[in-house]
Image (tube, rainbow, N blue to C red):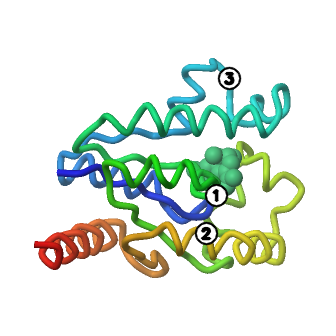
Amino acid sequence: MKNIALIGFMGTGKSTVANCLNSKFSMEIIEMDKLIEEREDMKISEIFREKGEEYFRGLETQLLIELQSKENVVISCGGGAAMRACNVEAMKKNGRIVLLTATPETILSRVKDNTDRPLLRGNMNISYIRQLMDERRPKYEAAADVIVSTDDKTVLQICEEILEKILEMDEQNV
Ligand code: S3P
């Protein structure tokens, strides 16, 4: 099976969904942010603060290129990873791209107590989230093979919907 790249705004549930695909459906997962933190031995917020956002974006691109050679893995991407065309190209090389969505209200309720999202520091409010989401939406939607909304659903329902939609896609391509 091809890889599954989970993309979408911060707080759309990419990591939670990836963990569920791992535990319930035995799929191997790669959490981009976590791997970057391990390799750099720094938290994402420290990388942004000490080395800058561009440096972090370079690490994301490097990692996605490296992951092209993998198979059967779920890649939980950072929320900004789908903004660069070359990243999307790398995701598509060997995988399906699944976009997770949620309303700004849902996002805020999920991320409000988290302090390791540098882009939301001092911006933890609906209007900022809505604005950044509106800016990013065209690129998210253009990249996606499959779109799944996560509002008011259980994580298991979301995983089942993802797998169903991917299967449908595969059948249509036969
Ligand atoms: C970012 C999202 C974060 C992380 C970094 C930048 C973004 O990942 O990669 O803080 O640009 O949207 P999550 O989407 O997992 O929060």
Q: Quadrant of residue 9?
A: bottom right
How far from the left and from the top, in percent, is residue 2? 23, 51
> Where does residue 124 sit, x and y in percent of width and height?
81, 63
> Taking 50 as reference, is 105 left or right?
left
- Residue wearing tag 2: 139
Q: Are marks 2 and 3 in contact (CB under 8 Å)?
A: no
Between marks 2 and 3 in the image, the one whose residue lies nearer the viewer: 2
Q: Are marks 1 and 2 in contact (CB under 8 Å)?
A: yes
Q: Which quarter of the picture shows residue 120?
A: bottom right
Point out the tag, 1 or 2, that comes first from the N-terminus: 1
**Between disc 3 and disc 1, whose residue precedes?**
3
Categorize mark 2 by other alpha carbons within 10 Å: few (<14), some (14-19), many (20+).
Answer: some
Q: Residues within 10 Å of mark 3 (few under 14, many from 20)?
A: some
Relative to 113, does residue 140 appear above or below in the rendering?
below
Q: Identify the residue position indicated by label 3 in the image.
A: 42
For the residues labelled 2 and 3, the Cα–Cα distance comes to 28 Å
